[in-house]
Image (spheres, rainbow, N blue to C red):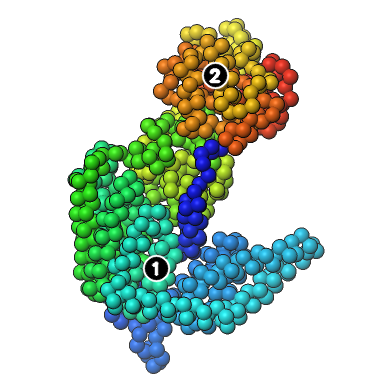
């Protein structure tokens, strides 16, 4: 586990805001397709649309003289709010919560008479949560045969009560709030103040609050405005790709190093693919560039306001293609101009900043990762892979078979990163390793490795405490991808290495035995050395603190003829940078990559402590020191991982009374 300082209050608060915002946007994002469908039908078939059709657009009268209802009105009044409510309720209490939440929302919809997106975002989760609490009252107390009767009537009765509550209590409140929010927007537009929202929106985007702002707040308000006016400027306050494009163009022309080299590809993915997260690291690498995105955002909003332009529905993802597809019939000039001017202003300011600063943006993205993680120098996969916030050293406790990319929404940057890494892993021949993408809110603790942007690492750790966390800052071409593949290569190449007195697994003792069993004898150049010896096993450690335990492990490595004093010193250096605590009372101290030249031979040592050693807040009973030359130590590491992944084997180690018992426990793991 992590030995770094506890997260700051600011970091924790930001994670809390992200979590709440993600929950709000999580009710909208799965239903974006429905919003787009409504937007396309509106743009095409309303009276002022491209292909006006009264029966679809809801204007004019039919042959019988009755007004057409159309699709536009019912979809936004009933379909979209009910989908939102069902999604919110389901997130809280599965399908049962979704159904009850949708029933309650119907009361708000009918009571208000206007699209109730905010009401749906309240009633959906409320319905799921209250139903869950009610079910808990009689959980396990229903007589057999009556479960379906009780469950169905409970959901029906409570849903009806919630519908009445929504009709009489929630709908007036939400109607009032919606009206006030609309007045605030009108005030900002009328007084030319709406561009100032970029001062808050642009920094919030870089802090991964973009989906919370866009789909949790602006989409519901913008949809209401679009229904009334046929379009809304609110859909482009956050989604305008111009500010980010300007940043990436500036790096293309005036940046240096990997940032300059990767900027063209990032710009294409950002502008055409609509994955805005890809430019965030370029800003985080040089935070003053946030001024460029602010100015670009303000310019884009001002252009939209002056030209009275907007979109008919949200553009998701924020691709220029999606933006143009949802642009109102009379707004193409203003929307295109807003994107161009936002890009130009952002580009000019970012270019000035890059050209006048000392480093001129020459720090590459890997360096930005190191800076943000508070570490120095290039890290190997071992020091980059975290388990609950810390690195595991040279070995992993869990074999890597399932990898998940996680981002805020699970639809943009994570999908791209998963695709890139999946291709690399398949090209390396690891067909049994799966790579998927997922929203952080939907993560479950069923993965071996989680790849996530470092700003979202805290939330990923909370959702997947058993997984190894790898943080990246460049979803398109992070050097961490190659390190993951290298780790998988090592994992696949790992072979059983015999302990002293223990024969290798399933290996014939002689050529005659091999002939009898029709199993060929493996060709060997030399006898594989024993990396764990009896004299390197201590069953009663003599120190009481972490520094002393590292020294004791280092002394045993030296006595085994494996390392010198410089390597032992580097073991302390490694611990000050990245914890080697692995969980299950195990720590595996080892030297830094730079100290590999101080290894004369591979060796492993084992020390058990009667009283747990405080490993920066984590209890450690077993300290396994490692010095690895080439791949000779990988077999023992595989055995260590298997032993400490099995509580029964850990108990056997605690009870062992001789060094031979320890050798036997490790030696028989793979037998």
The total of numbered circles placed on residues is 2
Would you place residue 429 above or below residue 306 in this image? above
Tag 1 near tag 2, CB within 8 Å: no
Q: Which residue is mark 1?
A: 218
Check disc 1: other Cα within 10 Å, few if <14, some if 14-19, many if 20+.
many
Where residue 488 appears, as percent x and y from the top left, is 46, 31
Sequence-wise, the earlier of marks 1 and 2 is 1
Q: Which residue is mark 2?
A: 554
Seen at 48% across and 63% down, the residue is 24
Seen at 68% across and 20% down, the residue is 539
Name the image quarter holding the N terminus: top right
For numbered disc 1, what is the local secondary structure?
Answer: helix
Q: Is residue 406 visible?
A: no
425 with respect to 512 (left or right)? left
556 with respect to 66 (left or right)? right
Would you place residue 539 above or below residue 375 in this image? above
Q: Nearer the viewer, residue 619 or 40?
A: 619
Of tags 1 and 2, which is closer to the observer? 2
Q: Quadrant of residue 649?
A: top right
74 with respect to 583 (left or right)? left
For numbered disc 2, what is the local secondary structure?
Answer: helix
Q: Quadrant of residue 339?
A: bottom left
Where residue 278 appears, as percent x and y from the top left, is 34, 49
Check disc 2: other Cα within 10 Å, few if <14, some if 14-19, many if 20+.
many
Where residue 275 appears, as percent x and y from the top left, is 35, 53
406 with respect to 466 (left or right)? left
Q: Quadrant of residue 408?
A: bottom left
Where residue 390 appears, as percent x and y from the top left, is 51, 37
Q: Nearer the viewer, residue 291 or 218?
A: 291
Q: Nearer the viewer, residue 498 or 513?
A: 498
Q: Which mark is residue 513?
A: none
């Amino acid at each position: 586990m992590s030995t770094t300082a506890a997260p700051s209050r600011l970091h924790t608060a930001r994670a809390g805001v992200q979590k709440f915002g993600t929950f709000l946007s999580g009710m909208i994002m799965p239903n974006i397709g429905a919003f787009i469908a409504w937007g396309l039908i509106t743009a095409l078939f309303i009276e002022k649309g491209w292909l006006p059709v009264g029966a679809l657009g809801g204007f004019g009268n039919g042959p019988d003289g009755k007004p057409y209802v159309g699709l536009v009105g019912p979809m936004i009044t009933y379909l979209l709010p009910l989908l939102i409510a069902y999604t919110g309720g389901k997130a809280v209490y599965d399908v049962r919560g979704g159904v009850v939440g949708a029933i309650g929302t119907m009361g708000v919809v009918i009571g208000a008479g206007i699209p109730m997106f905010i009401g749906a975002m309240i009633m959906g989760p409320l319905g799921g949560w209250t139903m869950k609490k009610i079910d808990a009252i009689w959980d396990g107390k229903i007589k057999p045969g009556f479960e379906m009767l009780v469950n169905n009537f409970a959901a029906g009765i409570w849903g009806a009560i919630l519908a009445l509550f929504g009709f009489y209590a929630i709908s007036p409140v939400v109607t009032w709030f919606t009206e006030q929010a609309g007045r605030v927007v009108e005030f900002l537009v009328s007084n030319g103040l709406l561009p100032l929202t970029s001062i808050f929106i642009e920094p919030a985007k870089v802090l991964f609050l973009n989906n919370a702002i866009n789909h949790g707040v602006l989409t519901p308000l913008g949809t209401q405005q679009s229904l009334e006016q046929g379009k809304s400027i609110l859909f482009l306050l956050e989604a305008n790709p111009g500010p980010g494009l300007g940043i990436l163009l500036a790096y293309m022309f005036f940046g240096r190093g990997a940032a300059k080299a990767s900027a063209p590809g990032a710009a294409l993915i950002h502008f055409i693919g609509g994955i805005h997260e890809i430019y965030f690291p370029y800003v985080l690498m040089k935070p003053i560039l946030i001024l460029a995105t602010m100015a670009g955002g303000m310019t884009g909003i001002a252009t939209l306001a002056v030209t009275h332009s907007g979109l008919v529905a949200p553009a998701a993802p924020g691709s220029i293609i999606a933006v143009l597809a949802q642009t109102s019939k009379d707004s193409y000039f203003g929307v295109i101009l807003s994107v161009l001017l936002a890009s130009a202003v952002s580009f000019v300011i970012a270019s000035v900043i890059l050209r006048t600063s000392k480093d001129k943006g020459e720090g590459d993205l890997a360096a930005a990762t190191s800076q943000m993680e508070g570490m120095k120098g290039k890290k190997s996969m071992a020091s980059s892979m975290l388990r609950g916030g810390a690195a595991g050293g040279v070995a992993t406790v869990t074999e890597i078979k399932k990898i998940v990319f996680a981002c805020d929404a699970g639809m943009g940057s994570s999908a791209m990163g998963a695709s890139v890494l999946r291709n690399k892993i398949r090209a390396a021949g690891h067909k049994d390793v799966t790579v998927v993408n997922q929203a952080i809110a939907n993560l479950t603790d069923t993965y071996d490795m989680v790849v996530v942007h470092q700003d979202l690492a805290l939330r990923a750790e909370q959702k997947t405490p058993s997984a190894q966390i790898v943080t990246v800052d460049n979803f398109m071409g992070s050097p961490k991808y190659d390190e993951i593949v290298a780790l998988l290569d090592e994992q696949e190449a790992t072979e059983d290495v015999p302990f002293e007195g223990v024969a290798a697994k399933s290996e014939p003792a002689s050529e005659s035995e091999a002939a009898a069993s029709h199993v060929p004898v493996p060709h060997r150049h030399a006898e594989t050395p024993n990396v764990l010896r009896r004299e390197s096993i201590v069953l009663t450690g003599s120190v009481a603190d972490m520094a002393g335990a590292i020294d004791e492990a280092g002394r045993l490595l030296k006595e085994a003829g494996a390392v010198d004093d410089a390597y032992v010193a580097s073991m302390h250096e490694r611990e000050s940078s990245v914890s080697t605590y692995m969980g299950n009372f195990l720590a595996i101290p080892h030297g830094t990559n730079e100290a590999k030249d101080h290894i004369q031979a591979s060796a492993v040592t084992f020390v058990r402590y009667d009283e747990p050693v405080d490993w920066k807040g984590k209890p450690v009973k077993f300290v396994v020191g490692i010095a690895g030359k080439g791949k000779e130590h990988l077999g023992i590491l595989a055995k260590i991982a298997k032993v400490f992944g099995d509580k029964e084997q850990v108990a056997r180690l605690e009870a062992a009374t001789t060094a031979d018992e320890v050798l036997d426990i490790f030696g028989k793991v793979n037998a």
